Structures are given as structure tokens and as C-alpha cells.
Image: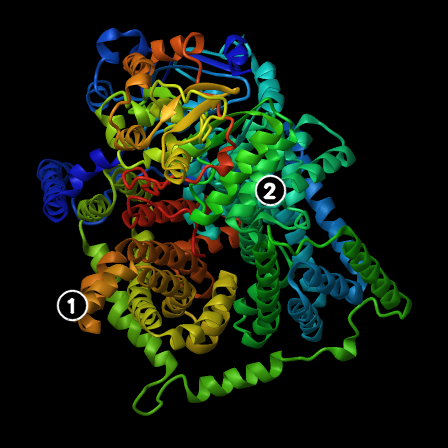
Amino acid sequence: MNAMNAMSTPVFSVEGLWKVFGPKAERIPADPALTSLEPAELRARTGCTAAVRDVSFDVRKGEVFVVMGLSGSGKSTLVRCLTRLIEPTAGTIAIDGEDVRAMDKSRLRELRRHRAAMVFQHFGLLPHRTVLDNVAYGLEIQGMSKAERRARAQEVVAKVGLEGMEQRRPSQLSGGQRQRVGLARALAVDPEVLLFDEPFSALDPLIRRDMQEEVVRLHREEGRTMVFITHDLSEALKLGDRIALMRDGRVVQLGTPEEIVGSPADDYVREFVRDVPREQVMTVRTAMRAGECGGPEHPGAIAADAVVAEAIKVVADLGAPACVVDDGRCLGVVDAETLIASVAGRGVVAADAAVAGTAAAGADTAVAAGSRAAGAAPVPKTAAPAERPPATPPPTTDTGAV
Amino acid sequence: MATVTASAPRALPGGLLRHRAAQKLLLLALAAAILVPLANAKWASGSWPEALTVDLTNPLTTASNWIIDNRDSHPLFLYGFGYMSNAVVISVRAVYLVLLAAGWTGVTALGALVAWRVAGVRLAIGTAAAFLTCGLLGMWVPTMQTLALMVVAVLASVAVGVVLGLAAGLSDRLDRTLRPVLDTMQVMPAYAYLLPVVLVFGMGVPAAVLATVVYAAPPMARLTSLGLRGADKEVLEAVESLGSTARQRLLTARIPLASKELLLGLNQTIMMALSMAVIASVIGAGGLGDRVYQALASVDVGAALSAGIPIVLLAVVLDRVTGAAGERAGGEHESSPRTWLYAAVAAVAVALAGRLAGRLDWPGAWTLNIAEPVNRAVDWMTAHLYSGVPVVGGTADWAAHFTTWVLNPVRSGLQWLPWWSVLLVVAALAWLIGTWRTALTAVLAMAAIGVLGVWTPSLDTLSQVLAAVAVTLVLGLATGIAAARSDRFERLLRPVLDVFQTMPQFVYLIPVVALFGVGRAPAVAAAVVYALPAVVRITTQGLRQVDPAALESARSLGATPGQQLRQIQLPLARPALLLAVNQGVVLVLAVVVIGGLVGGGALGYNTVFGLAQGDLATGLVAGAAIVCLGLMLDRVTQPTERRAKKGA
């Protein structure tokens, strides 16, 4: 199914996107002498700040696409460019093949009303309205009648678990509840894509985990396409089908969580993912070696996309190598040695070739994004992400910066 | 991102600042060294040279005569100002008649019910009590006159203010043009607005209403714009991300988000309108202000007091009710339309009951004449406390001493100074505190006073202002520091400051006349009393808002309370202290010129004289000089960044 999606038109297709703030910003993307400058030098030379630099990627239908980076890396600007809340300086953006930058005002409004809804870091709720009226606000903007929009809002309020709070005001809610209202407001307009701008970074860790699971649940139930901005690596790994890692406005690597952790594109990414518990992210597919169990009973019988941590448990219980099974067919074998090698980050022979290929392509992001869409299919995530134990965030990423 | 660039000048603050101040002074000295000998050679030093004045008496008299002659015939008046004036008269009259028709029972009930709905039971009782006191003092009719004028003026001010505020809030360009104008209008003494409107509309209600609107609309405009601009950016972004049109954004998000500022604007507009409506009695507003004005003219303190008390009550009630409405805005206390309906029905019922009972006018038997006992008390005071009290002396003695030992020397000192040295001092002060722009404005304003030919009276007014400011600052800073250090003292002080800050300027003249008689000293005393609350409040707030971490670290190093105050609190509260000085100066000037009514002389007197004698030329020139003086004083004391909201 994923392979088929990869072939169909992407929901968002971004090509060579630039956003430059400052005087005469347009000249920067066009001038190769300026585009190659480092951010600090560019600012000194031209007074401009390039928040997004030559970014390209596709967001496929039904996937959770995470843009992750530290504060100031341009990720929030990037997501705002998608619906032109911030006007891009150069490049193309297409939604379902339609050019967003060419849209006139009313078409753009149509896009914002029906096709892409956003959830904000600080919720962006209207303090003078009740929960119900906040949720119904998007529908009100569209001109829906009061009774109809309230009925619809009521449904969504129930969906995000806020029943009984309809008549409260945002000031009477906790942070997590407020963000549920923000989420409900975005869901109420039934958009094709949900855009999240660091939605949970203002919340307490425990509430944040609840909300992440809420998003996972919603995604599982509705299969809605999501673009998720975060500065928290563990959040990115937990939610993302694919992750684009940004630094200084550029995408330094784009790939599945496993690719990012398993084969970092450069030292920056390597430093970033250093403390990720690899056994929680790497799948058995990359840890197995060729081999056959040689019988129909498949001892252990682990799915290829189970994480290494599960395989360790199975192998430990079994006391012998376990068989990796896909569709009743034996793909290979994992044993204590291969699993340890995988956790230690030492390449396993069989999987290395495929991953190394992406790593090389990852160096040039634009190409990587394009080529992956055509070629290497992402690892399907059949195991429900909610069941996957949460990875501990590495200290370097969990800055708590807002 | 900005931190990189900002950190560079912060590296050497003390040295650089001293350096820059010295540079400025050096530059100024250089300019003076060249210009002063030239000026001295051409025109003598001493008072402002005759050769540099422009006599505006003739053109102004001609203009004023032309306007008087053509007021009934020229199309500009017939179809422009005439309509405006008629509209004002008709609406004030209509509101007045409605108020009278509602009777005292109706008005009291309506006031109490509105207060109940927006501000709760306690204020409702307070409102009813205030109205009944007005009646009890025999001031029901003047109160209604003032109220009618206020209603029309406030509605017009709010309309004008909201339109200007919306324009400035939505368009950056308009904001850049409007902001300095509104800022300047806000520091002008109320008095200065009277003469131009009289020139166009003549004495009477229309002029009073228009002067009130001009005076009261700026805060509404400023706060509307501030509210629109201060809205949470992310909320607006969220609203935009849902595909709202610009109109939807304005109506469903920006205006509701600004409701707190809008209500604060309404509150300030009402307070300023009341203040002006009372002062405008000088140009024929009638009502309570007129009673005070007439009583002061004949030094009848008792009569002035019985009209002054309703003004104070009105001010306190209006301020508390609108203030409470502002605090509730955005809260969960939204009252449903139905309770409003009940309130309206109840008010109408009470009004009808009063009407049927034949109690439309305040019953004459229920009035309490306080004028006589008050006057008797004042007479007793005059006899016993004015002078010759052993050891402490009397109040009149104090006033006389103050005049002889402070006001006179300062005045003659200022007038003795060569004119160019005054300009130099103004330039130096303004430049040191502000920027070269503020310095230039200040010098030009001061020079304009000379050109207008009112150099001497202006310096007289200035001497009163300086004396009053000095007293205000000494008292205000001391009280402010005390209040910042003791919670108990602040708790005691707060309600007093609240009441004092809401009272219209005019009212302050009553007690000082009772205490000190007439003259320049009482004008200064009134100014000090008027400006003191704002100075105390800003000082206290500034000191209390000093970063607690800095204070704590000083304490942990073992600093004594005195060291904490001198080394941490006062330096860190510098912006607030400068603002206190600025506000003190502006407020003092506003009252010093009104002091012309009680013998303050100088510019204030010229204005009153011009109005009373129909000699508009003298009045207008004095009014223009007041404006220039206000501009100069504000710019001289203006710190580089001005606070968005004013204390008073």
C-alpha cells in the first residue's frame, strides 16, 4: 500500500524552497555567490537572514512527515510557508499537484479553510470564546450555520476527549486540554493535511506523552496526512514515518527514523542521534543475517519490522537464533551476535548495502528526497507506534527551548 | 538573532554613556560659542528681543472679528460648523430632557442597575448613594446638565477615537503619523484647547462639547490602536491559518482580543471628558463646573464645595464602574441579554413609579445646604489659622513665605537670565535626557514663546511650574520610596491615591482657596496635590518592579536596606523615575495654568482674561504659549522611550 502511495501525487511537493528575511530578499536565492554563504556571513554581507534554504521534499498521502531541528533551524518558517502564512521567497510548493504560490487570495483561503489546518505551539485559542465555539471557529469562518457547526464541533470535542468542557473558556483549561481544543479546532474543518507546529513543546512531559499518543491514535483511526514540526528527537522518532532533519535552514538528512539513527548523513546528525537507544528504533530487518531456519516451524518467528528490543527478548527466551518471518516465508535469522552488533551501531552485513545507499544520497537532500520517492520504499510501520516503548530523548536535543 | 548585534554597545555602558553625554555637551558648547556672540551683537541679551517677536494681536483680532461677523452668514459656518454646532446643541438638549424625564428616581435606578450588571452589587449601591448625594446637596439639575454634556461628548469621543484607533491599529503608515500627534495631544494642558474652539464656535455648549471631544478622544484612539497591535500574534496567525478574511479577523479576533484595552480607553476617555467638561464651564458649558467656577470667582468656598462634591462622586463612580467592566472583560462573567432586559425593565418601572408619585424633580425639602456651615468653618479658619498661629505660623503666612522665598526668586531669576541662555539650558537638558530631535522640538517651542511676545509671562508660569515640580518630586519620591518599602503603608495609601487620581483638575482649586486664599501659592499647591498621586504611584511601581533576583543577590551579599535602595533599586528603576518626572511636569503645568482662575496670574490669567473680555487675541496667544510650554517641558523630560500607557 505504501509503495502505491509513493507513486501517487504527493500531498505536498516542495521544490527548492527559500525563505529569506531582510531587505531585498528576492536577490539571495537567485545569486549562487550568496546562496553558498554561511548564515552569519550572509547576514553580515546583506543584512538578510535565510530561514529556509533550498529545501525540497514530498509529503506522501497518509504519512506522518516530521520536520525536526533545533530552535532557529527554520522548521517553523518552513511549515508556515506551506500555506503561505509566511510568503516564500523562491521555489515551488504544490498541494495535490496544484501550485500554492500561484494561488490568488480566494483560492488560498479555500486551501486554508478546507485542505490544511494547523495546530500551534501556544494553542492560539480565542480567550473570549468557549471551548465549543473555539472548536467551531473554523466552520464559522467558512460560513456554516450555528446549529450545524455546533453539532460538528460537538462530535470533534468528543473525539479528542473533552466532553463536559464545552462551555469552559480556554483560561479554565490545563495546557494539555487547551492543546486538545487546538487539535479539535483543526480537525473540525476535516482537512486533508494536519500541520503541527511544535504542538507539545509547551506541555509537561507526561501530558506531552499523552498528547503524542493521542496523535498516534488519531492517525491510526483516520489515516490523515500530517506534517509535524518538533525540536524533540524522541518525539520525531516516535511519530514520524519519515523525518527531515533541519539545520540552519537546510535539510541535512531525510529518511525513516531507522535510516536517520542507523546511518546518519553527517557528523551533525550522528551527534544528534548519538544517545538514541538504537534497540528501540532499529528493526530486525537491518539486524538479521542471511540464513534459513530450515523448517516450517520458524523458531522465534519475529516480524521483519519488529524493533531490535523485541528480538532481543525473543532470542533471550529462546536461547537460540530466531527466525525472521514475513508472510510465512523465512527472510533470515537473528542471533545474539547480530543483535548486539545492531545495538552497538556496528554494521550488519546483509542490511548495510541498502542503508548505505540512502546515506550517500542523504548528503544531497534534494536528490535524496526525490530518489527515495521513486526508489527505496520506506520501511512500513505495521507495529502500532503506540506500542513501541518511547525512546529516551538524548540530552542534546531535549533543550526545552520554546 | 538580535542579541549578537545588541551585545556590542552593551559591553561598555557607563563609559560610553558618559562619553556620549560629554560629547553632546561639547557640541552644544561649540554651537553656543559661535551663536551667542552673534546673537548678543545683533540683539541685546536679557529678555527676549523685541526685534524677534511677531505681534499677532492685529491679525488675530481681525480673524476673530471676521469670524464673529460672518458666523451667521458665511457658508463655511452655515453649512459646516453651523450644522455641527446645531447637532451638538440638539443632542445635548435631547439627552438632558431624557434625563429630566426619567426623574431622579429613574436616573438613580438606571445608574445603579447598570453598575450592578457590569460591576457588581457594591458598586451599584455606591452609584445609587452618589446620585442621591448629588440630589441631597441640591445639585440635581446641574449634575444632569453635566451628565448630558458628558454623554454626548463621550459618545462622540469614543466614535472619533475608535475610528482613529482602528486606522492606526491596522495601518502602519497611519500609526506612524498619528502616534506623535496623539502623544503630544495627551500632554497638552486641557486649558489650551479652550480658545481655538471658542474662536470658531463662540462661547457655549457646542464649544464645550467639542473641546471635550478633542481632549478626550486621544486616549481612546491610542488604546484602541495599542489593543489591536498588542493582540497575541499566534492567535491571529491561527485565525488566519483557518482561512479567515480580513474582515472576519477584525471582527471575530482582533477587536474581541483588544476588549480590555478598549474598555480601558473608554474609562480614560470618560475621566478626561469629565475633567474637561468641568473646566469647559469657563467657555459656557454650564452644569456643575459652572457652579464651581462662579463660586470660586466670588471666593464662596461653601458653594464651590457643594458643587465640587458631586463632581468627585461622579468621577469616582464612573471610574470604578468602567474600570470594573474592563477587569471583567474576557472573564467568564458575561451577563446574558436577559438579565440586561430585566435591569432595563426595572429601571423603567422605577422611573414610572417616580413619575406617578409626582416626584420628578428632587424634592426641595430634601436638600441639605452645606454652603453656609462650610463658609462658617472657612471664616473661622480664616480668622484663626490664616496667620499668627504661634510657632507654626498660619496657612496664609506659609503661602506668603512660599511666594516671597521661592516663587519670587525663581521668577526673577528666570526673567533675569539672558534669553539665549534659557534656550541653551533647554537644549542641554532635552538632549541629555532624550535625543537631538526632542532637543530641537523643545528649543523651537521655547523660541516660539519668545516670538509670540509672551516671554515674560511664560517665564512666570515656568517659575511656578518649576517650584511645584520641585515640591512634587521631593514629596512624591519620598512617599513613593516609603510605599515601596512598606506594604502596610502602600495598602493605606492606595485607596487615597485612587480617589485623588480620578478627580478632575478643577476640583483641586476648591480646598486650596479655602486654605491659602488666592494668589500664586495656592495655584502651585493645587498643582502639587494634583500631580502628587501619579508621581507616587509611578515611583512605587518602578521600585517594586525591580528585578527581585538582583535585589536578592544584593541581600545575599549582605547589603543594608540603604545600600539596596541606593545601589540596586534606584538605578534599576531609573526609567520609572524619569517617567515620574515627566508625568509630574505635565500634570503640574495643567493645573498651574488653571490656577489663573484663583490668582495664579501669568499665562493662565491671560487666557481667562481673553475669554472673559472677548479679547480672543490675548487669549489665543496665551493658549499657544501654554501649548509651547507644555511641548517644551514634555520634551525636556522625555526619556528616549515613552511608556505606552499613562498613569493619569
Question: Which residue ends up furthest to the bottom in the rendered image?
Answer: B390
Quadrant containing the N terminus of chain A is top right
Select label 1 or label 2 by which is in front: 1
From the viewer's side, name the closer residue of A316 and B34.
A316
Residue at horizontal 36 percent and vertical 33 percent from the top: A320
Please, what secondary structure does the residue beneath circle 2 have? helix
Report whether A100 appears left or right of A402. right
**Residue type beneath disc 2:** Pro
Q: Of the numbered discs in the image, which one, if any, rests on residue A99? A: none
Crowd class of label 2 (few under 14; some 14 to 19; many from 20; radius 10 Å)? many
Kindly indicate the quadrant of the structure image that contains residue B483. bottom left
Q: Is residue A250 visible?
A: yes
Q: Chain of mark 2?
A: B
The residue at which mark 1 appears reads as B557
| Residue B391, x across and y down, in percent | 29, 90
Please state the horizontal and vertical placement of residue B454, each as a whole percent of the image.
Answer: 34, 48
First reached walking from the N terminus: tag 1 or tag 2 = 2
Residue designated by label 2: B256
Residue flagged by tag 1: what amino acid is it?
Leu
Chain containing the residue with disc 1 = B
Up the image or down, A281 lies above or below B314; here it is above
